[in-house]
Amino acid sequence: MNAPLFVAAAIFACFIIVFMYYRFIRKPKRLQKIYEQILAGDTRNSIRDLKAIIIKGGGTVDTHYLLAECYRREHTYQMAIVEYRYCVNTGKKPALGTEKDILQGLVECYLVLGKEDDALQELFALIQLEPKNAEHLYRVAKIFYDRGNLEQAVTYFDRTVKADPFHAQSLSYLGMIMFHVNQIKESLVYLIRAIKVDPRNFRAFYYLGRVYMEGKDFIKAITYFDSAQLSPEYRIRAYIQKGICYREMEETNNAIEEFKKAISTARGKDVNLLLTAKYALSELYEKNGKLAEALEQWEDIHRLKPSYRDVPEKLEKYQTLRADDNMKDFLVSSTPVFESICANITEHLGYTVLDIKHIGTSTATILASPKTGIVRNPKQQRVYIKIYRDAVNLGADAMKTLVEEAKVQRCGGAVCISPVKFRSDAIEFTVARQIRLIGGEELSKILAKVKESHPQESWEE
């Protein structure tokens, strides 16, 4: 027997045995141990061990896959992508993971880094592997929706629902999109399906409210907005829409309350919603003659966004009022202070107050008589004074009411006072009648004189 040949063969056989042991027994066991270490959350030591393996022998596809998983869990996404791509490029399948795992890891990393085109390519590859996987289809749909590509978004949301008829998110997105393209019936079907599947799908509740608003069913709309406002994402929007519903129902106080809730809830990132709520509230105040309150909202809006809608024009229109502190006091003072101002105005006009009454907080009626002179028939010389502080342009109807109220009080004349100008039909109505109209600039001048003649009195709260 050839001894040298036998020795060489033995050495070769030992080498093969050792190689096979490390290649197929010890190394996989070591990687399995590292894999378990990763699952336990010890990614830093795992990275060190995996790098050591790669430095020694290059590492298998499993080594690079596990390293990619470590980097992803450590939020080092760019490094994770390098390792995942290495796995894809080798064309080999890892024993400790699957092609699906690698592609999903790539999708997550690309989305975090804002690389949507790359994420889409990996998602399309996943869809080829699993054509009926609803989550892959949904993620594609969501990317298209976020990009504003509604046609493709609808296609993939629809495919998602076909793959999983109970996919509530896709149903709610379809309902929302159908609402915005004015397909109200289709929207209603999708949204009702969404809340049946998921009773906490707040997007569906919010858009159901919008659907019923469109149909003028404000009571039903409010019930859905009440559900939607439980979500931080839709809370401010729901408050605003509820405010609009109450405004349309002419429930002004409720509308104001909802707009105020929206304003108090808004934070820095909600600036557009904040502007919407403030403008809606200002419109409501203006419509109801609360000019001082409306001005406060317009000035806030102007500070946030000077060019917002017609706010610059509004501020220009009411520039005189903004600069007139006496008029502001007249408009916003408490009822006792307002009563004092009314008494001072009456005195300035040459009358003595006999009686004063308040209608709410914005209107006062005064029964007065002339200060001087001998009056044969005091009742016929009494004057009925009605003072408004809501900045509403009064017309002929208000003058007719004034005349009737003066007759009931058996007064020979009347005075109507308003912080803004009277309408032309009101002025025409007073021609040849014992009615004096004081509005706008004339009232401002009177307030200045009254303030000057009563310097000791404070009109502040």
Image: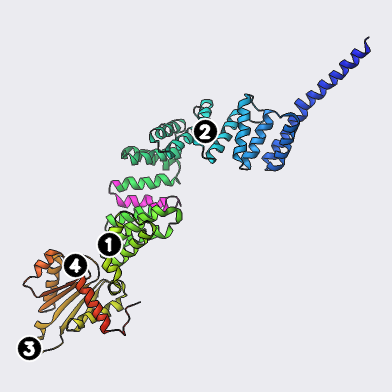
Amino acid at pointer 2: Asp
Confirm or deny contact between disc 1 and disc 4 (CB under 8 A).
no
Image quadrant where residue 310 sits? bottom left
Pointer 2 residue: 118
Of 162 and 426, nearer the camera is 426
Q: Which comes before the other along the chain, label 1 or label 4?
A: 1
Mark 2: few/some/many CA within 10 Å (<14, 14-19, 20+)? some
Identify which residue is drawn at 43% across, 58% down: 265
- Mark 4 vs mark 3, foreground winner is 4
Residue 165 vs residue 453: left or right?
A: right
Look at the picture and state if 347 lies above or below 101: below
CA separation in Å, label 2 and label 4: 64 Å
Q: Which comes before the other along the chain, label 3 or label 1?
A: 1
Across and down, in percent, residue 21 comes to 79, 25
Pointer 4 residue: 421
Amino acid at pointer 1: Glu
- Residue segment shown in magenta: 214-237
Across and down, in percent, residue 294 comes to 31, 63
Magenta-span inclusion, residue 449: no
Pointer 3 residue: 376
CA separation in Å, label 3 and label 1: 50 Å
